């Protein structure tokens, strides 16, 4: 009904590998992009900066983790640690007087360097063992952050981020901060979108499916594992820095604890491995749903006049939120991105049930 | 009404700017005036390679010059073998430049058929699509035909061929370029030397009765036919067309060569025969001509697809389709569209019809035609309801495919429309349709007897029975030779009833018997895909076509189709019994022609035991059928067939 495909013909392989050959997809993406641009005009600043902005940043983080976990198939439980490296590097660099543009770059490079260390673990171990190894690294990082005052200023200290400037322009307004987060998320999205149609993306998928089979095909799986970890860490570093700069305004160790790592991984898994739209949806579900469930529940409770002790009131939404994740994954184990794809396929073959032979 | 002469208008080709034009001149007009417009697209490894008119003109000239260097000239013929390819089309036009005969053949033609063709005219060369067709030419040589040169398009598999006179298309063009460089006046000579009276193409009659007869269409014939169809609203300029019809069918030549060059169509050549449906969607042509059975096939695919679909989609489809079909029938009865009809049509277009047309690449079709034989009424109404302005077209090979067409908004079920501009139509006393036009050929090749029989005083005796209505619409009933009577004297055309049977998606072919008998009976071949699918869904086990065809459940399915057809037939012409045959009719077995027309005589002879059983009341009949494979080998298929009462 919405997806019209007749008359789409390609006169070159370049056109054949377009990101969105179907007009409907193209228009949808354009619409969402314009919606993103117009968001400061449409959404109240309170909601914009406390919901939409973190959602975009965490989406960028989820996309970065998806690169290594979804595309390259390497389970990673230390993503928050890598983000912390970026955050602290950037803040220190900025405090040292380095312009923010370079500070962000330093954040990315520092994270990429540390993150590549994880790749060496991935050379030796796979699956659950890799998960455990990366988890161990996360704990090491937590320990470093809380025990090396030179970096964090101590276990309970927080590091003030200097005023944010880009290209000489101080960015302090709510809309300005939002656009920085939006811009970064768009850049990461475009990068990951292009993974599908480049040699890098195909090599990563080959490594994911079976690394020694990939090696037989001539794909250097060691090299691509390192590239995957380094690239994803680079994204993590800048995302971590931007999280501090645009949202928290100060860096402290508990922002990057092991729970955060697990949360980002949950975004990726709930969203769907190697799914871009899934990363957006996963981040939304994990990040926004608890607050939403909370307010929905308390509103219902108020409306019905229930009297409950605050303990119960706090836990029921959490239980509902957990149940929701379980339900989504039971309905579609491949994640929210797959649910979106199922809906798209439903309309793609409309009014038939499958592609004709 | 009989004896009426119907001329659509006094206009004729000679009064138009196309008078005195030839295909080479028109091609060169396109190559110079419209150099950058797209003439041809061919899909190669998933990518549409485009050729502008300038490229195409150059390709044809080089090819002609190359053939000239090989000594090919007028009175020579070139055999064209293969599926639709740009180079095969270019080769045909090149032969026209050289005033020779381009002789396209059906890609499934047997050696005997090809031998018959090759012995009609001195063969100077053969243009073959690929190794398979080169091998065919080699077989022809081995059988004694003299074909000095073999040119091939696709080189795969031909590296090690050490055969005299074998050269690739590229080599031919190189020879042509050298020839053009050596002879400065050759280019002009190639463009200007042929006249409108020179041959454009050498076709063959379909041969429903006897051997195919040679039909040479002159350039004046084919250009005039294109002009008539254009003036009659059959197509506009610059249509997008898909070249997928068999090269040897006059409809393909008339469109993708004659009309395409005259009116600057973009001709799209699919990657392979198997990918036609997919390529159709990518191209989304603006003009689409298909035989009724292709339309039937698409209809079957749609119906099977919908049956498999989800409940909601199925429900929506039936909701809108039922209303659209009813509205269409009211419209055909001459009633105007009500506001509600309009609403359902627009909503349906968005929700159901548009997406279906989109799935099949038919959403841009402004000129959709069916031709070759009569089309089932239900199929016709279905497509009109879908919003495709399907029209009937009537013509023969002998007059370059275009006699009469329906106009888009004035469609009646039983007519084929008005005669085209420049075409005169007359009905003889015994009801035969006669045609006079500049597109009518000059006679069968080297066959004066047949010519004398068909062409009298410039009137082409079409062999079709029909009549003209008051408003000038032509009604075609069927072949004159096919109009038969029952023992009671009731006149009927078996083909008409067969087409109605074939509307059922489960019936692929049918043969109705009843001439000189008390009642009508039929033999049908099930559609393996549709019935097979139905059997899977309904849990009917089967192991083969033959097995499936005799299942009791399948007979029940067929019976419903028969009952449905019977309701639309007069009491005396109802079908009483039928047999579901254990093999499909096949052109290789001679039961149908390559265009899938029934060879009634062959079928009635071969299945004589079945026909006897149908009339003597026996419940079963043992039948042995001969199956011919493409290699020419034969084998026997035996089966006890069941006779079913309707």
Image: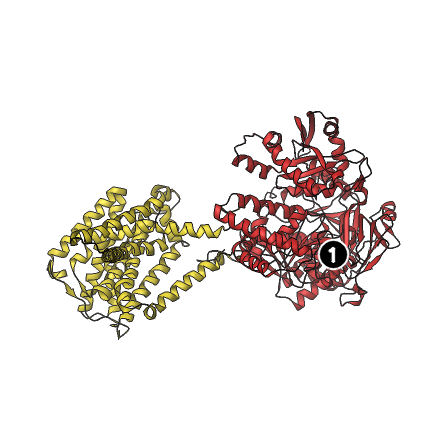
Chain colours: A yellow, B red
> Going 18% across and 67% down the picture, which residue do you hit?
A161
> How far across and down, in percent of the image, does residue B1 sit?
84, 54
Q: How many marks?
A: 1
Q: Is residue B110 visible?
A: yes
Q: Is residue B12 above or below residue A330?
A: below
- Marked residue chain, label 1: B
For the point 70% across and 56% down, the residue is B411
Residue linked to disc 1: B417
Q: Residue at x 89, y 54 (%)?
A: B457
- Residues A19 and B570: in front is B570
Q: Position of residue B355 (x, y in %)?
A: 53, 54
Q: Is residue A233 left or right of residue B529?
A: left
Quarter of the image for residue A171 reads bottom left
- Which image quadrant for residue A303? bottom left
- Residue toward you, B433 or B628: B433
Of the pair B309 and B605, the residue shown nearer to us: B309
B151 or A306, nearer to the observer:
A306
Tell me if mark 1 has few (under 14), some (14-19) or many (20+) residues whose alpha carbon lies within 10 angstroms of its own: many
Up the image or down, B639 lies above or below B327; here it is: above
Q: Position of residue B46 (x, y in %)?
A: 53, 52
User: Dot 1 lies on which element?
Assistant: loop
- The picture places residue B564, in percent across and down from the top left corner, at 65, 41
* Drawn side of residue B167 relative to residue A153, left or right: right
Q: Is residue B236 above or below residue B202?
A: below
Most distant residue in the front direction: A305
Q: Does residue A7 appear in the picture of this structure?
A: no
């Amino acid at each position: 009904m919405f997806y019209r495909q007749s008359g789409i013909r390609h006169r070159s392989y370049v056109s054949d590998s377009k990101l969105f050959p179907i007009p409907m997809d193209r228009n949808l993406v354009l619409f969402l992009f314009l919606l993103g641009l117009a968001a400061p005009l449409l959404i109240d600043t309170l909601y914009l900066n406390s919901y939409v902005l973190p959602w975009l940043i965490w989406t960028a983080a989820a996309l970065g983790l998806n690169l290594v976990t979804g595309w390259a198939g390497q389970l990673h439980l230390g993503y928050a640690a890598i983000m912390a490296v970026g955050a602290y590097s950037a803040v220190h660099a900025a405090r040292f007087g380095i312009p923010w543009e370079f500070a962000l770059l330093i954040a990315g490079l520092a994270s990429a360097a540390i993150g590549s260390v994880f790749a060496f673990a991935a050379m030796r171990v796979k699956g659950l063992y890799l998960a455990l190894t990366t988890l161990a690294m996360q704990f090491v990082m937590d320990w470093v952050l809380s025990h090396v005052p030179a970096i964090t200023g101590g276990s309970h200290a927080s590091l003030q981020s200097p005023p944010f400037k880009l290209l000489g322009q101080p960015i302090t307004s709510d809309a300005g901060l939002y656009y920085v987060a939006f811009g970064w998320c768009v850049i990461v999205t475009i990068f990951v979108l292009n993974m599908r149609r480049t040699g890098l993306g195909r090599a990563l998928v080959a490594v994911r499916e079976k690394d020694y089979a990939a090696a037989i095909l001539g794909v250097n799986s060691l090299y691509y594992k390192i590239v995957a970890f380094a690239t994803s860490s680079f994204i993590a570093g800048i995302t971590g820095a931007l999280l501090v700069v645009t949202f928290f305004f100060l860096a402290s160790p508990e922002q990057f604890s092991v729970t955060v790592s697990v949360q980002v991984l949950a975004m990726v898994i709930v969203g769907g491995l190697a799914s871009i739209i899934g990363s957006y949806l996963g981040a939304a579900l994990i990040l926004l749903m608890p607050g939403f469930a909370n307010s929905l529940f308390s509103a219902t409770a108020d409306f019905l006049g229930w009297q409950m002790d605050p303990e119960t009131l706090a836990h029921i939404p959490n239980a509902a939120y957990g149940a929701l994740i379980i339900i989504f994954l039971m309905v579609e184990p491949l994640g929210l991105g797959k649910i979106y794809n199922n809906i798209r396929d439903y309309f793609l073959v409309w009014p038939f049930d499958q592609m004709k032979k | 009404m009989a004896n009426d002469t119907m001329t659509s208008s006094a206009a004729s080709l000679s009064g138009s700017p196309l008078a005195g034009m030839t295909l080479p001149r028109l091609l060169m007009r396109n190559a110079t005036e419209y150099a950058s417009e797209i003439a041809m697209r061919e899909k190669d490894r998933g990518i549409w390679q485009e050729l502008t008119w300038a490229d195409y003109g150059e390709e044809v000239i080089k090819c002609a010059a190359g053939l000239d260097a090989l000594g090919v000239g007028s009175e020579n013929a070139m055999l064209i073998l293969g599926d639709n390819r740009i180079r095969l089309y270019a080769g045909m036009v090149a032969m026209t430049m050289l005033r020779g005969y381009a002789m396209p053949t059906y890609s499934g033609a047997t050696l005997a058929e090809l031998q018959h063709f090759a012995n009609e005219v001195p063969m100077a060369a053969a243009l073959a699509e690929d190794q398979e067709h080169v091998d065919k030419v080699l077989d022809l040589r081995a059988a004694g035909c003299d074909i000095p040169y073999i040119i091939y398009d696709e080189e795969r598999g031909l590296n090690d061929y050490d055969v005299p006179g074998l050269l690739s298309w590229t080599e031919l063009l190189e020879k042509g370029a050298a020839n053009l460089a050596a002879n400065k006046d050759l280019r002009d000579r190639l463009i200007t030397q042929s006249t409108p009276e020179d041959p454009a193409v050498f076709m063959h009659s379909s041969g429903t009765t006897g051997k195919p007869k040679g039909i040479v269409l002159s350039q004046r014939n084919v250009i005039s036919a294109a002009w008539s169809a254009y003036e009659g609203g059959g197509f506009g300029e610059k249509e997008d067309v898909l070249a997928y019809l068999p090269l040897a069918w006059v409809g393909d030549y008339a469109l993708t060569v004659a009309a395409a060059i005259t009116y600057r169509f973009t001709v799209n050549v699919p990657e392979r025969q198997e990918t036609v449906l997919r390529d159709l969607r990518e191209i989304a042509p603006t003009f689409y001509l298909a035989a009724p059975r292709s339309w039937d096939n698409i209809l079957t695919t749609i119906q099977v697809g919908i049956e498999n679909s989800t409940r909601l989609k199925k429900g929506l489809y039936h909701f809108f389709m039922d209303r659209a079909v009813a509205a269409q029938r009211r419209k055909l009865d001459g009633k105007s569209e009500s506001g509600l009809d309009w609403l359902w049509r627009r909503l349906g277009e968005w929700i159901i019809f548009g997406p279906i047309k989109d799935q099949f690449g038919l959403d841009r079709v402004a000129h959709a035609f069916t031709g070759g034989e009569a089309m089932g009424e239900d199929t016709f109404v279905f497509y009109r309801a879908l919003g495709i302005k399907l029209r009937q077209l009537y013509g023969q090979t002998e007059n370059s495919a275009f006699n009469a067409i329906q106009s888009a908004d004035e469609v009646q079920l039983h007519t084929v429309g008005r005669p085209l501009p420049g075409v005169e139509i007359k009905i003889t006393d015994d009801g035969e349709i006669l045609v006079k036009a500049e597109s009518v050929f000059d006679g069968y090749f080297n066959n004066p007897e047949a010519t004398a029989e068909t062409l009298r005083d410039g009137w082409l005796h079409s062999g079709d029975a029909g009549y003209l209505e008051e408003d000038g619409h032509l009604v075609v009933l069927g072949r004159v030779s096919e109009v038969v009577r029952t023992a009671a004297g009731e006149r009927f055309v078996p083909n008409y009833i067969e087409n109605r049977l074939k509307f059922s998606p489960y019936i692929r072919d049918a043969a109705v018997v009843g001439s000189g008998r008390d009642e009508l009976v039929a033999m049908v071949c099930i559609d393996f895909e549709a019935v097979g699918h139905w059997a899977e869904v309904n849990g009917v086990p089967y192991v083969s076509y033959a097995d499936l065809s005799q299942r009791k459940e399948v007979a029940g399915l067929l019976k419903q189709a028969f009952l449905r057809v019977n309701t639309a037939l007069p009491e005396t012409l109802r079908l009483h019994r039928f047999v579901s045959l254990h093999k499909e009719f096949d052109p290789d077995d001679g039961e149908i022609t390559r265009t899938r027309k029934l060879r009634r005589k062959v079928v009635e002879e071969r299945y004589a035991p079945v026909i006897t059983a149908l009339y003597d009341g026996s419940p079963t009949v043992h039948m042995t059928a001969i199956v011919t494979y493409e290699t020419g080998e034969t084998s026997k298929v035996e089966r006890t067939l069941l006779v079913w009462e309707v």
